[in-house]
Amino acid sequence: MQTILGSGGIIATELAKALTDYTKNIKLVSRNPKKVNDTDKLQKADLLNASEVERAVEGSKVVYVTIGFPYNAKVWQKTWPVFMQNVITACIKNNTKLVFFDNIYMYDPNYLNGMTEETPVNPPSKKGKVRAKLVNMIMDAIKNDSLSALIARCADYYGPGIERNGMIREMIFKNFASNKKANWLSSLNYKHSVTYTPDAGKATALLGNTENAYNQVWHLPTASNPMTGRQWIEAIAKAMNVKPKSQVATKFIVRVMGLFVPIMREMPEMLYQYDRDYVFDSSKFEKRFRIQPTSYSDGIAEIVKADYS
């Protein structure tokens, strides 16, 4: 049995599809799980409840953590460590491998231009400090409690499927589809890597089913030579056959928007990811598995074909 904790999101969905290459025994766990594959087993659970987490993990060879708590620093501080401790405890008790789908929030902002698995950890944000704590919990359990685990880390992401599919989709694709200007944060002039969600799902499934991939960090396959914000907008506009009209949200504008839109209140501390080059390096994965990530042009074309044609 291979189990996904936090099913329903785009990453969990792509992962569930990809896992069928390795097993037909897939369990999806969330408050209201829905099948991705016909053979999926479903289990309802409150994943902040230790006994329900243990019941979800029981009998699993591998557990994948793809849960997403509300995008709020205070919520993250309260929920993530409790959840992760429940998962670690359950995995150790059941001799279950753990795969944690992670982001780059914990990296030092001075080293975002060429991020590798060795990039220094020095999070500047409250949410980043939570992510760093989770990684430390996993690594400590590997060292002290014989947990077998790996961290699969991606950049911002984009891909087919309109719902909950990353900032690029929200800021550009959806706006162009509604005859609105594209949005971008801070500045249009910096490079910004984005991971293609089908690549992320396939790579996470591969890592989870590769014995010697455990007890280390992996960057998921992400195209090199990322575009700047302006180039992203121009490329997507061309693919959607619209004019590349755009507007930039500065920190001041984002703060004003936060007075009316709750999620925007969480964005000012994350704007550093857009005021400098944000370049994600996945060469470790590419060399190990001889897999090339989807190019940005192909990714954009696939999204337009799937969702806007």
Image: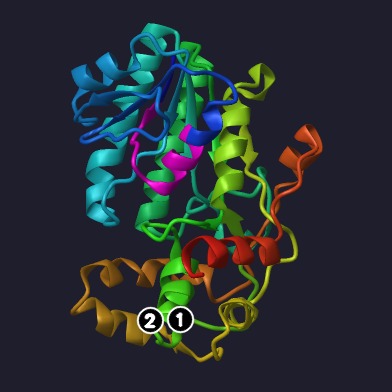
Q: Residue at 58%, 84% (x, y): give it.
A: 241
Q: Quadrant of the N terminus?
A: top left
Q: Are marks 2 and 1 in contact (CB under 8 Å)?
A: yes
Task: Indicate which disc residue 118 carries.
Answer: none
Q: Which residues are magenta?
A: 4-16
Decide: few, some or many residues near mark 1? Use Cα within 10 Å; few <14, some 14-19, many ≥20. Answer: many
Q: Residue at 32%, 26% (x, y): give it.
A: 85
| Image spot of residue 63 (x, y percent) | 43, 23
9 magenta-colored: yes
- Residue of label 1: 176
| Image spot of residue 279 (x, y percent) | 66, 62
Front residue (pair 304, 7) = 304
- Where disc 1 sits, the SS reads helix
Decide: few, some or many residues near mark 2? Use Cα within 10 Å; few <14, some 14-19, many ≥20. Answer: few
- Where disc 2 sits, the SS reads loop
Q: Residue at 38%, 8% (x, y): give it.
A: 94
Front residue (pair 138, 238) = 238
Q: Is residue 150 visible?
A: no
| Image spot of residue 107 (x, y percent) | 55, 53
96 magenta-colored: no
Numbered label tally = 2
